[in-house]
Image (cartoon, rainbow, N blue to C red):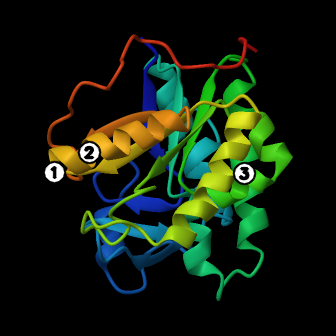
Amino acid sequence: RVVLAYLSIGEAERYRFYWRQEWYEPGRAPAWLAAANERWDGNWRTRFWDAGWRDIILAGRDSYLARIKTQGFDGIYLDRADVYQELLSERPDGRSDMLRFIRDLAAAARRDAPGFLIVMQNAEELLAHAQLRAVLDGVAKEDLLFGVAHDEKPNPRAMVDGSLADLRRARAAGLPVFAVEYLSDPATASAAERRLRGERFVPLITERSLGSLPRWPGADGRLPNTRPPR
């Protein structure tokens, strides 16, 4: 099996190895620690362009990336690349900063492991950049069709169409696309799976808490239509 390690590059999580208890105290948080994520207890947005956060993620033998590689994972599953959208008032060039961050992370990861896999979740608008597509081995999208407000309702058509255009660009570039829908109604789940498969995406229908993980539909241990090994 191909096993990827989850890595949030846009949020700090208090249950990770790098967290320090004193950061809760006024004036003691690092400069890269931004506002809390109100939807996920224990998560804080990060100023991902800050050297301190970049060091934690990718620099040196004790970085998050180094720890993942030491454990023998095949690659990383990047989350919260879209955090730049929430910090544009503070960092107008955040989009460019995030693109650079991912490229630098990929370069660091592959310096001694050319086949190390990089899969990015969400932030699909960044796929318009060919330089980013070139360093990715796959993309994933949550709530493509339903539940953008965490309510399992259909998403606005314009939103779906915009995301589909970006994800189709990835497919045309030879990248596998993984789509995660959090649905509990069997009929809705079946309809979502049919549509996703029609797009040649790999669907996963599950619960948002991820407290249980159903069998991946069509699971056979392989990534569909992946690029040749690097």
- Using the image as rendered, state which of residue 90 and residue 188 is in the foreground: 188
Q: Amino acid at mark 2?
A: Ala
Residue lying at 43% horizontally and 75% vertically, measured from the top left: 29
The structure residue drawn at horizontal position 55% and vertical position 38%, both measured from the top left corner, is 199
Label 2, residues with CA under 10 Å away: few <14, some 14-19, many ≥20: some
Labels 1 & 2 near each other (Cβ < 8 A): yes
Number of marks in picture: 3
Give the Cα distance between marks 2 and 3.
Answer: 27 Å
Which label number is shown at residue 165? none
Find numbered disc 3 in the image and state the secondary structure of the residue it sits on.
helix
Can you tell which quarter of the image residue 152 is in? bottom left
Q: Please name which of the two marks, 2 or 3, marks the residue nearer to the observer.
A: 2
Q: Are marks 2 and 3 in contact (CB under 8 Å)?
A: no
State the image coordinates of residue 149 (x, y, percent, origin top left). Answer: 33, 72
Q: Along the horizontal axis of the image, is 37 left or right of 228? A: left
Which residue is tagged 1? Answer: 185
Could you say where residue 67 lies in the image, as x and y percent from the top left? 48, 30
- Tag 3: amino acid: Leu
List x then y, in percent, for residue 127.
72, 51
> Residue 24 versus residue 196: which sits nearer the camera?
196
224 w.r.t. 122: above or below: above
Query: Which quadrant of the view contains residue 13?
Result: bottom left
Residue at image point 36% right, 39% down: 193
Q: Amino acid at mark 1?
A: Asp
Residue designated by label 2: 189
Alpha carbon separation for disc pair 3 and 1: 31 Å
Between residues 222 and 65, which one lies in front from this camera angle?
222
**What secondary structure is marked by label 2?**
helix
- The answer, for residue 46, to whether it is visible in the render is no
Q: Tell me what residue is drawn at x 42 percent, y 57 percent.
A: 145
Residues at badges 3 and 1 in contact (C-beta under 8 Å)?
no
Left or right, residue 126 beside residue 190? right
